[in-house]
Amino acid sequence: MIKRALTIAGADSGGGAGIEADIKTFTVLKVYGMTAITAVTAQNTVGIMGVMEVSPEIVYLQIKAVCEDIGVDAVKTGMLPNSEIVLVVSEALREFNVKNIVVDPIIMSSSGYPLIKEDAIGMLISEIFPIALIVTPNIPEAERLTGMTIRSIKDMEKAAKEIKEAGSRYVLIKGGHLGNGNVTDVLYDGKEFYYFKGRFFKDKNVHGTGCTLSAAITAYIALGYNIVESVEKARKYIEGAIEHSLQVGKGNPSPNHIWTLS
Ligand code: PXL
């Protein structure tokens, strides 16, 4: 039977990030995609014009609806805009015994727009991280989560150790923001570090890469790959999506989610 992946995230009308990135990624990677939408953003490649947060009840009911009927092999969380939504997502994932939880701790859009309320960040750490299989912060997110300044691989290791304390099985810190010619992402399982090296495209400020990577990790986990394989394969997928990125609007390029098809 086809594997099933759920994304609990915000919608990006521009199609580069959020729910749209997730569904495209799930589809291209041959996984059946489902959504629980937490917020609707009016957005294009230039920036965000407005955000409507979905009611916590409807967020809860979307998760309940798909879990009770269809079932979920892996799930990712993206934009969780406020503490009420963080709480119901945590409750629903526990109530429906959802496994293979990938947490992308979205804090700000690449254009600098806050996507989670300040008072919900602590709750994300205390309620969602403990049930996560893997948490996938980029450098600014890891800095916000730990209060550290991250300038090197050693700093990334230190931050990964601290974030791991919140209780997730794995932490993946994405090194793109340190990028100078190549990127190193650091995965930590509580004992060992794994280093993933890739190309850095320095002139391409592609929007939605974090969402796309975490969606791809979720898809590969749903397909039955282990974490190290899933991260490795997802990084190959996002690297191609950045290399072949699309200048669809007047602002930042969007990932080419369907690059594998051409
Ligand atoms: O890339 C982070 C992100 C996640 N989710 C939504 C977004 C963005 C960035 O703009 O709009 C809905």
Image (cartoon, rainbow, N blue to C red):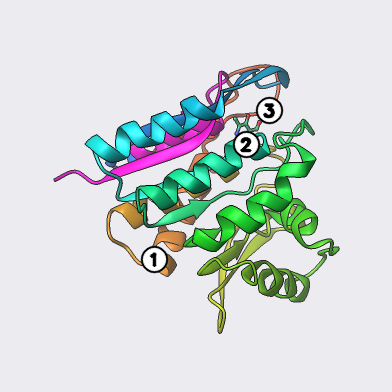
Q: Is mark 3 within 8 Å of ligand 1?
A: no
Closest to the observer: 235 or 167? 167
Q: Determine the secondary structure under disc 1.
A: helix
- Res. 245 mark: none
Q: Is residue 98 depicted above or below 39 in this figure?
A: below
Is residue 24 at least partly visible in the picture? no
Q: Position of residue 99 (x, y in %)?
A: 37, 57
Residue at numbered disc 1: 229
Q: Position of residue 97 (x, y in %)?
A: 35, 53
Q: Determine the secondary structure under disc 3.
A: loop
> Does the CB distance between marks 1 and 3 fall below 8 Å?
no
Mark positioned earlier in the residue sequence (1 or 3):
1
**Part of the protein shown in magenta:** 1-27
Q: Is residue 171 depicted above or below 219 in this figure?
A: below
Packing grade of label 1 (10 A; few <14, some 14-19, many >=20) is: some
Residue at numbered disc 3: 252
Mark positioned earlier in the residue sequence (3 or 2):
2
- Res. 84 mark: 2
Q: Position of residue 77 (x, y in %)?
A: 51, 44
Q: Determine the secondary structure under disc 2.
A: helix
Q: Residue at x 49, y 33 (%)?
A: 21
User: Hey, what amino acid is under mark 2?
Assistant: Glu
Nearer to us: label 1 or label 3: 1
Q: Residue at x 67, y 70 (%)?
A: 160
Mark-to-mark CA distance, 3 and 2: 32 Å
